[in-house]
Image: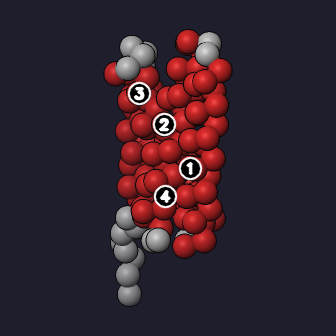
């Protein structure tokens, strides 16, 4: 299992866990909490595989950024949450940082 597959899986499971945790907070039903915890556990397993295939610093930097961006999309489209223009700027910076972390460019080569 390579790094990109592992980190993508971890991000998907973490983001889904966040969504389910929000559903638990809205619906106040313990089933949502139980499922959210199980999904977070699966995300943690994939994250551990990502760390095994790459550096801890890369995995720890990329996963939360990607989860935050997906969480913002869930909040905006599903829960109707809105952001300020300054927050949109922060999202753009996060996407830029994520791109640089996952696909590093060799600016000063040789």
Q: Are marks 1 and 2 in contact (CB under 8 Å)?
A: yes
Residue at point 48% right, 61% down?
6
Q: Are marks 4 and 3 in contact (CB under 8 Å)?
A: no
> Which residue is more in the foreground, 94 or 6?
6
Q: Quadrant of residue 103?
A: bottom left
Answer left or right for 57 relative to 69: right
- Residue 20 visible, this angle: yes
Q: Which labelled disc corresponds to residue 77?
A: none
- In the structure shown, which secondary structural element does the residue marked by tag 1 occupy? helix
Residue 98 lies, with reference to residue 103, above or below; the image says: above
Answer left or right for 26 relative to 72: right
Q: Quadrant of the C terminus?
A: bottom left
Q: Are marks 2 and 4 in contact (CB under 8 Å)?
A: no
Q: Position of residue 80 (x, y in %)?
A: 39, 14
**Could you tell which of marks 1 and 2 lies nearer the N-terminus?**
2
Closest to the camera, between mark 1 and mark 4, is: 1
Q: Label 2 neighbourhood size at 10 Å, few (<14), some (14-19), many (20+)?
A: many
Closest to the camera, between mark 1 and mark 3, is: 1
Residue matched to label 3: 74
Residue matched to label 2: 16
Residue matched to label 4: 7
| C-alpha span from label 4 to label 3 | 19 Å
| C-alpha span from label 2 to label 4 | 14 Å
Answer left or right for 107 relative to 32: left
Residue at point 53% right, 20% down?
23
Q: Which labelled disc corresponds to residue 43?
A: 1
**Could you tell which of marks 4 and 3 lies nearer the N-terminus?**
4
Q: Quadrant of residue 94?
A: top left
| C-alpha span from label 3 to label 2 | 9 Å
> Which residue is more in the foreground, 50 or 103?
50
**Could you tell which of marks 1 and 3 lies nearer the N-terminus?**
1
Residue at point 56% right, 41% down?
39
């Amino acid at each position: 299992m390579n790094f990109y597959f592992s980190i993508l899986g971890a991000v998907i499971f973490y983001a889904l866990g966040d969504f389910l945790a929000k559903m638990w907070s809205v619906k106040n039903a313990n089933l949502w909490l139980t499922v959210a915890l199980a999904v977070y556990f699966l995300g943690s397993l994939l994250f551990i595989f990502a760390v095994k295939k790459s550096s801890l610093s890369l995995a720890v930097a990329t996963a939360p950024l990607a989860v935050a961006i997906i969480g913002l999309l869930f909040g905006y489209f599903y829960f109707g949450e809105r952001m300020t223009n300054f927050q949109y700027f922060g999202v753009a910076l996060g996407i830029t940082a994520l791109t640089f972390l996952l696909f590093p460019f060799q600016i000063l080569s040789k």
